[in-house]
Image (cartoon, rainbow, N blue to C red):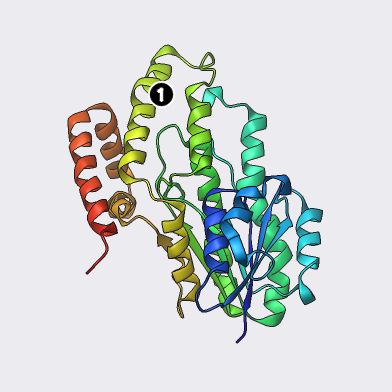
Amino acid sequence: MGMRQVLVTGCSSGIGLAVAVRLAKDELKRFKVVATMRDVEKRAALEAAAGETLGRSLEIHKLDVCCEDSIRECENSLPDRHLDILVSNAGMGMIGPLECQSLTSIQNLFNTNFFGLVRLVKEVLPDMKRRRSGHIVVMSSVMGVQELLFNDVYAASKFAVEGLCKSLAVQAMNFNIKMSLVEPGPVLTEFERKVYEEAKNMDLSETDDETARIFRELYLPYSEKVFSSLGQSPEEVAEQTLQLIVSKDPPFRHQTNHLYTPMTSMKHADPTGHLPLDAFYKIIFQHDRVFNVSLGIMRFLQRRMRKPKV
């Protein structure tokens, strides 16, 4: 079949960088990777990680998902505009009380996380339809399935992504185009570190004292424990993304951290929505000791899952 052309967005760091490099370093040499980023001045980390694949199986291009002209220019630079696989990864994060988020910052997040995907798909889908082949892989989140306290806006953007893809996937099947949602939980990246660093220093003057206290004294320490216990490396997510791409029958939805499955499954176990809401409320506000014990158990299971089999 030859090498398949892959375009990955948001490759300056984190998951995007890891996915681009993993595909470029594929032992079977199945992929030609176009690794893109909004600011190519931030390419140093990607170049270092790419190593000898740079200029061979990996090229770096400029692409801003918030600009239709930028997307089209990048697509036009490909031979015959041929793209076999799109990995839509570029995104923004946001946490904190809703009252403290400006409408401008909320709109900017949606412009990247949701409308950025819309722009990409609008550009590549017609060509994939004409060829009746292609695979669109979207980096979503477990928060596109199960919302989380103080992640209101980010979760909303991922819910929008999932709704768009679920609807498009039905149409895509008629054209032999595959669609897949990759849903990581916490991932230890510079992206996440920056989001939480900004949250620790955010201005909470627009909310009430109790909400500010819950955010600072409960949510932030809670999140830090979750990340230290359950956080995956971007390389783990990249490896699972590779396996999804090469699968003969890739799933529409793939959660990279199986320890989150019981939590996301609660949503489907109770159609009224009471079960997950009540569970998360009690874990956060009433049963701190149970939460800590549960994290310890999940941390143990995570290590067992990562331990290489002999």
Pick the residue in front: 240 or 291.
240
Label 1 Cα neighbours within 10 Å, binned few <14 / some 14-19 / many ≥20: many
How many discs appear? 1
Visible in this render: residue 97? no
Pick the residue in front: 289 or 187.
187
**Eyeballing the image, is 216 above or below 61?**
above
Instruction: Name the residue located 46 percent from the left edge and 73 percent from the top edge.
Output: 250
**Eyeballing the image, is 263 above or below 284?**
below
Give the quarter of the image for residue 286: top left
Q: Indicate left or right for 219 with 88 as reference.
A: left
Residue that sits furthest to the bottom in the current view: 1
Q: Indicate left or right for 73 with 284 as reference.
A: right
List x then y, in percent, for residue 224: 36, 33
Visible in this render: residue 266? yes
List x then y, in percent, for residue 261: 31, 55
The amino acid type of the residue labelled 1 equals Phe
**Eyeballing the image, is 222 above or below 229?**
above
Disc 1 is placed on an element classified as: helix
Q: Indicate left or right for 128 with 225 as reference.
A: right
Instruction: Name the residue located 60 percent from the left edge and 49 percent from the top edge.
Output: 45
List x then y, in percent, for residue 218: 33, 25
* Label 1 sits on residue: 215
Instruction: Name the residue located 27 percent from the left edge and 37 percent from the top edge.
Output: 278
Pick the residue in front: 259 or 143.
259
Q: Indicate left or right for 252 with 296 as reference.
A: right
The quadrant of the image that shows the C terminus is bottom left
The quadrant of the image that shows the N terminus is bottom right
List x then y, in percent, for residue 235: 45, 56
Pick the residue in front: 147 or 274.
147
Instruction: Name the residue located 21 percent from the left edge and 35 percent from the top edge.
Output: 292
